[in-house]
Image (tube, grey):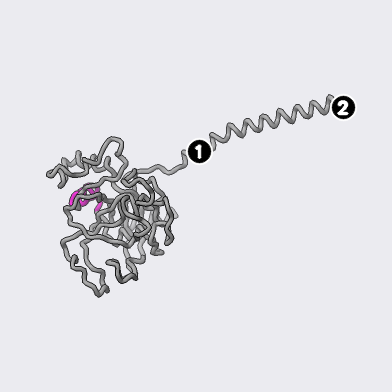
Amino acid sequence: MGKKVLMVLAALILMYGLIACGKKEAEPQEEAVAEQEAPAIVPGEMVLIPEGEFILGTNDKESNAYPEQKIKLPAYWIDKYEVTNTEFLEFSIKNSYAGEGAKEGHDWRLFFTSEKGMFPVVYITWNDADAYCKAQGKRLPTEEEWEKAARGTEGFIYPWGNEWQDGMSNTYESGPGKAVAIGEFNDVSPFGVHDMLGNVQEWTASWYSSYKGNPKRDPKSGQTLRVVRGLASRYRGKMGHLYDRSAQQPNALYDFGCRCAKDATPEDVAQAAQAR
């Protein structure tokens, strides 16, 4: 009887050992599968923003984005990520494009190294950004298109909602104090567009002017300054909002980058509806 009990115990121990080994072997495989399933970052990839209304601006009367209003836009595409150094380099080589800042020896090339290929291009003028987007068969987004892609249809003041969360965006609070590779932070809008709040500021197609309904006429209004959106890594994101806007000379060379947009066709909209 004792021998039988010992044999049963030995069999159970062996079985437990095999199960444990199997679990240990399976764990790395599960981790590998999880790593494989992580979405790849593809520069130039675009997101379709559907037709419809969204909330533009704010009811803060002291803001240059006053007043809050509902705007309806047709469907359009916008780049999922900011344009990278590598993308701009390829464009420059292919099109023999020197860039406006090259004349002064002060442009995006000063901030580009082989290790920063996936970093957003900066120190490009509005004309540089416009030329790049046109060469891709695209265009710069209007500030309305930029804001809808960033805020979603709920009118969030941050890409993730209305409450500030540390570490979500590459702003002053996060520590780097400089631009990082695209898509590194969880700064993702309701439409899945990345780095709309932080990392670098972005040129838009729009001329700067006061919003309709604002009783204060901004002296900067007129077709002289272009609208720049978003924040750079040196800005305090907690104090900012996705409706914030600034006016810049088109030839300004600072840490401004860009992303592109383009009109959506009826076929694009139909295919998106079928995919859902």
Q: Which residue is mark 1?
A: 33
Q: Position of residue 16 (x, y in %)?
A: 69, 32
Which quadrant does the N terminus fall into?
Answer: top right
The amino acid type found where label 2 is placed reads: Met
Q: Is residue 136 magenta?
A: yes
Q: Position of residue 162 (x, y in %)?
A: 42, 62
The amino acid type found where label 1 is placed reads: Val
Q: Position of residue 90 (x, y in %)?
A: 24, 39
SS assignment at label 1: helix
Q: Which residue is mark 2?
A: 1
Residue drawn at point x = 16 percent, y = 63 percent: 223
Q: Quadrant of residue 176?
A: top left
Q: Is residue 177 above or below residue 13?
A: below
SS assignment at label 2: loop
* Dot 2 alpha-carbon crowd within 10 angstroms: few under 14, some 14 to 19, many 20 or more: few
Residue drawn at point x = 43 percent, y = 60 percent: 163
Residue furthest left in the image: 103
Q: Is residue 174 above or below residue 86?
A: below
State the residue in front, 6 or 54.
6
* Dot 1 alpha-carbon crowd within 10 angstroms: few under 14, some 14 to 19, many 20 or more: few
Residue drawn at point x = 32 percent, y = 64 percent: 73
Q: Is residue 15 above or below residue 217?
A: above
Inter-mark Cα distance, 1 to 2: 48 Å
Question: Which numbered disc, 1 or 2, marks the residue that appears first in the sequence?
Answer: 2
Residue furthest right in the image: 1
Residue drawn at point x = 23 percent, y = 68 percent: 210
Side (left or right) of 110 relative to 234: left
